[in-house]
Image: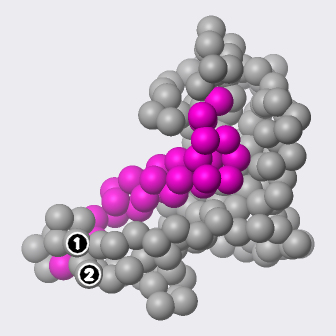
Amino acid sequence: MSAILSQHPVTKENEVEAIPFPLVYLRPRQAKTFRHSIDVYLKDSNATGNIYFARHFEWQGICRERWFFECISADMLQSLGVFITKEAQQQYVCETFAFQKIECEVNTFAIKQCSFSLSFRFLVDGKLVATGHQQIVFANKEKKISRLPEHILEKIREYEIDKAE
């Protein structure tokens, strides 16, 4: 799913909206939540043992790919097209350190015919340490924004959460 990091111009005609940030105020409804555990090592930290902020973006990608592979489509829809990250943001709540186990929770929201957004919550021992989101757009092999297959949208909706009112 490395194609998800490719650049592609997105216009209003592509039916993709900007997502407000921060998304700390999301509340789950009757949705599945994907969970993935990340082991943190010295290589992920600076000289004082604090985790580099850029690692959270790397972990978003790891968790996104694992969720898509395990829960949506193991072939990553490569025969149909590519996923493009239109937007990615991260908000840090508190420091993390080497040798902590970080749990990542992934849900979806703002699901459209051609795009969806992912919500990431990073926790250490049940305590929220960071949140983030990515807006993902699907494009065909010619890199033209395209509709996701309905059976894929149904699977993506299983992880959908609502915003708090």
Give the color scheme: rainbow, by chain, secondary structure or one colour. Answer: one colour
Which is nearer the eye, 61 or 90? 61
Quadrant location of the C terminus? Answer: bottom right
Residue beneath the point at 73% across and 56% down: 108
Relative to 79, 11 lies left or right: right
Q: Residue at x 52, y 68 (%)?
A: 36
* Residue 65 image offset from top left, x and y in percent: 53, 48
Q: Is residue 3 left or right of residue 145?
A: left
User: Which disc, if any, is residue 41?
Assistant: 1
Residue 43 rendering spot, x and y as whole percentages? 17, 65
- Going from N to C along the chain, the mark reached first, 2 or 1, is 1
Residue on which the image places disc 2: 99
Extreme residue toward the left, this view: 47
What span is colored magenta in the figure? 49-77
34 magenta-colored: no
Q: CA distance from mark 2 to mark 1?
A: 5 Å
Query: Is residue 39 something that shows in the picture?
Result: yes
